[in-house]
Image (cartoon, grey):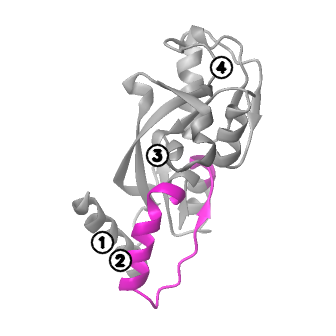
Amino acid sequence: IGALESTAATRLPPILARFHRRYPAVGLELVTGTTGALIAKVMNHEIEAAFVAEPFTADALEGDPVFCEELVLITPRSFRKVKTPRDIGRTTLIAFAAGCSYRRRLEAWLGDAQVVPERVMEFGSYHAIVACVAAGAGIAIVPRSVIRVSLAGSGVATSSLPPAVAKARTVFVWRRGHHSMALDAMRAELRRSMRRS
């Protein structure tokens, strides 16, 4: 299965542990990537299913909403308080590669205010993104849950975003019409986990 890095780090460990205890004979491999990359892997039959973030477009997929993330803007502690996109100015945006739905949300919010980042620095992990923001290299958008588990999280300031930007649903998706015992078992484990929370 595939997952966003934030989902793999903050949401999946207890779920995968319970799944493994319940179904010890099922081999499970986890790959991480952006929403766009994961959807492509599902569509190309490289992975069976994936945890991706809205918004995404893929008519050939079915899915179950499983988590709701609160996205926050992170800035270096020395950065001015951010209340509107204009407070950001032409600062460097630190983000995952194109295909990241959280990045698209931030770029749309900035674009609506006609704010264009000076440049975009792309990284492949939240640890690197948070550490670079803490070091003063720019700003980023991350799930609040990532800040809670990040060692560099204390070195950044967080700013709330408008609800339309901040509220991001994670959906577990698979190819339309595809069924397997392992997929059905994972969907059942996710339903049990959602009842617990």
x and y percent of residue 162 in the render? Answer: 41, 21
Q: Nearer the viewer, mark 4 or mark 1?
A: 4
Q: Earlier in the sequence, mark 4 or mark 1?
A: 4
Disc 3 versus disc 1: distance between alpha carbons? 24 Å
Q: Is residue 32 left or right of residue 186?
A: right
Are circles 3 and 4 on residues that touch, CB within 8 Å?
no
- Which amino acid lies under the numbered mark 4 shown in the image of this protein? Ser
Q: Which residues are magenta?
A: 8-37
Assess disc 4: are there few (<14), some (14-19) or many (≥20) residues with their C-alpha within 10 Å of its C-alpha: few
Queried whether the magenta region covers residue 53, the answer comes back as no
Q: Which residue is mark 2?
A: 185
- Residue to which mark 3 is pinned: 145
Residue located beneath label 1 in the image: 188
Q: Report which quarter residue 167 is drawn in.
A: top left
Q: Kindly give the residue lying farthest to the bottom in the view shown.
A: 25
The Cα–Cα distance between marks 1 and 2, rounded to whole angstroms, is 5 Å
Residue 179: percent from the left, percent from the top? 39, 74
Q: Type of residue at label 1? A: Ala
